[in-house]
Amino acid sequence: MKNLRKEDLSLHHYLKNYVLSDFIETESNVPLSYLKDISSSSSYVYEASSNMDPSPTSKGRGWVYFDNYGDTTEQTSSVVVYNNLGSVISGSNYNVDYIDGRVIFPNNSFNPSTVTYKWHYVSVVDEWSDVESSDAPIIVVDINSFQKEGFQLGGGKKVPRRVNLHVFASNTAERSDITESLYDGLYLKCCPYQEFPKGTSIDWDGRFNTDYEYTTISGFSSLKIDNLRVRNFTPPLMRIPSNNYFMLSDLNRYRSTVTFDMFHWEEA
């Protein structure tokens, strides 16, 4: 894995699980629906029938898989499944698909009925194309130009990146809250620069990667934040000729950008 990808994953992990921790929501006693078409004799799949808006399983969100930031083990209290009698089913009896909002049992003897879970209210994505496939609020992480610079004295390099966090919110208050949380979580802060020797915390199928390790990279400093700036955008206007009035673009109506330089020191 190239360093730029590691920096992107490290920042994404830091934003979603730490900076935006105030935007983790809880949905309680959500009915579970059995998915017969994708189940088998050794894999009984149940999906949470949520009516939340935005959807907890829309792009860039998902259920919470760590009880605390910095953990390396799977949550034990953020997802709780109940049977048809209202009793808690031990987490050792099922797997959780945190991306799609599902629980998977090895057989049909547990009678799962409802689930209570924590979920990420703010969608955090890396691609502009993902904005239209999810509902606000959304943050697009955009890491761009960089140029490695030598130390003034001795060996090693300073590796800077320019980062833009594009915020799309549902209203002015929400935009202000998210933007302020980003600013407070980044101002005079450092983001741990992680290594991912055994993959990220979530596997391709949405389940927790039990081999996940929280490991910082030897010979590299943490990812330092500098020149932090915030800009709120005046929404663009689109003319409707037939009615001769202006209509605001829904996507850009409540938008801001948090811009900063992120850099680390690389030993020779």
Image: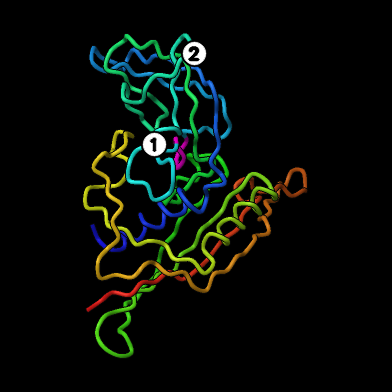
Residue placed most toward the observer, 3 or 189:
189
Image coordinates of residue 175 in percent, x first then y, are 64, 51
Residue placed most toward the observer, 100 or 242:
100
Q: Please, what is the dominant secondary structure of the magenta stretch?
A: loop
Image coordinates of residue 169 in percent, x first then y, are 61, 47
Residue occupying the far right of the picture = 244
Please name the residue shown 32% across and 9% down the image.
Answer: 109
User: Is residue 60 a member of the stretch shown in magenta?
Assistant: yes
How far apart marks 2 and 1 lie (CA) works out to: 21 Å
Give me the disc on residue 86. Answer: 2
Give me the disc on residue 75. Answer: 1
User: Is residue 24 a member of the stretch shown in magenta?
Assistant: no
Q: Is residue 137 left or right of residue 114?
A: right
- SS class of the residue under badge 2? loop
Please name the residue shown 55% across and 37% down the image.
Answer: 25
Image coordinates of residue 217 in percent, x first then y, are 27, 63
Q: Amino acid at mark 2?
A: Gly
- SS class of the residue under badge 1? loop
Screen quadrant of the N terminus: bottom left
CB contact under 8 Å: marks 2 and 1:
no
